[in-house]
Amino acid sequence: MPQLDIKYQLQQGTGPVGEPVRANAWEIDIPALGNVALFAQEFKVATMEVDAMEIRHFNGVAYIAGKQKVEGGSVKVRDVVSPDMHQSMHAWRKRVFDIESGRLGFASMYKEMGFARRYDSLGGLIRTYTLNGLWPTKLDEGEFNYTNFEGVLLEVTLSCDWFTIA
């Protein structure tokens, strides 16, 4: 069957073929934080990398897959008066390390599961990222600024053990 060029497909409405995934059709869900999906402004998905392991044999070198590592992502959340997003983020970070007592929490106390979802322009689910072992490593409290009328954004840097995409 012959394929039509992408310009024709998009102009003639041949359905989802060639339709771009839009960057603004998404949501983040971290059940432990409550309504974070309503106030999230930006989310950077974690990245996965596999190091190369070097194998030497006589004068030759070959590379095979080695250790896997996942670089955490981040989420920017609009701080609102109610529900108190700052308090939710701060309470999660406090489960990791309580600065007042100097105690570190157990991983089972602070690691959470999260979900990031991408949707098509009609609201249909395209893919789900399941983020496992998610926890905050840094909480940026935003800024005090008389010239900014956009509101306060809280940025949380996240660590993630591993993730799957379905």
Image: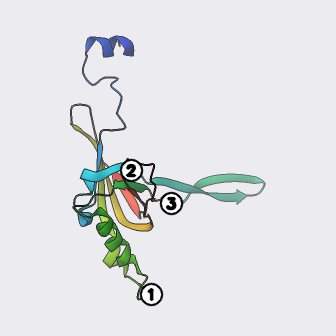
Looking at the rendered structure, the kind of residue marked 2 is Phe
Q: Position of residue 138 (x, y in %)?
A: 46, 66
What distance separates the C-alpha of mark 1 from that of mark 2? 30 Å
Q: CA distance from mark 2 to mark 3?
A: 22 Å
| 94 lies above or below 77 | below
Can you give x and y, in whole percent of width and height, for residue 55 in the image? Answer: 66, 58
Q: Which residue is mark 1?
A: 102
Q: Residue at x 22, y 61 (%)?
A: 82
Residue where numbered disc 3 is placed: 68
Instruction: Please give the name of the residue rendered at 32% of the width and 58% of the height, measured from the top-left corner.
Output: 79
Label 2, on which residue? Answer: 43
Name, please, the residue furthest toward the bottom: 101
Q: Nearer the viewer, mark 3 or mark 1?
A: 1
Above or below: residue 23 compared with residue 102: above
Amino acid type at circle 1 is Gly
Label 3 residue SS: strand
Does the rendering let one see residue 5?
no
Residues under numbered marks 2 and 3 in contact, where contact means CB atoms less than 8 Å apart: no
> In the rendering, at what x and y percent does residue 96 appear?
39, 77
User: What's the residue at 27%, 34% (across, down)?
Assistant: 120
Query: What is the CA distance from the residue labelled 3 to the residue labelled 1?
Result: 32 Å
The furthest residue to the front: 146
Tell me if I can see residue 54 in this picture: yes
Label 2 crowd bin: few (<14), some (14–19), many (20+), radius 10 Å: some
Q: The residue tagged with tag 2: helix, strand or loop?
A: strand
From the viewer's perspective, tell me whether residue 146 is left or right of residue 35: right
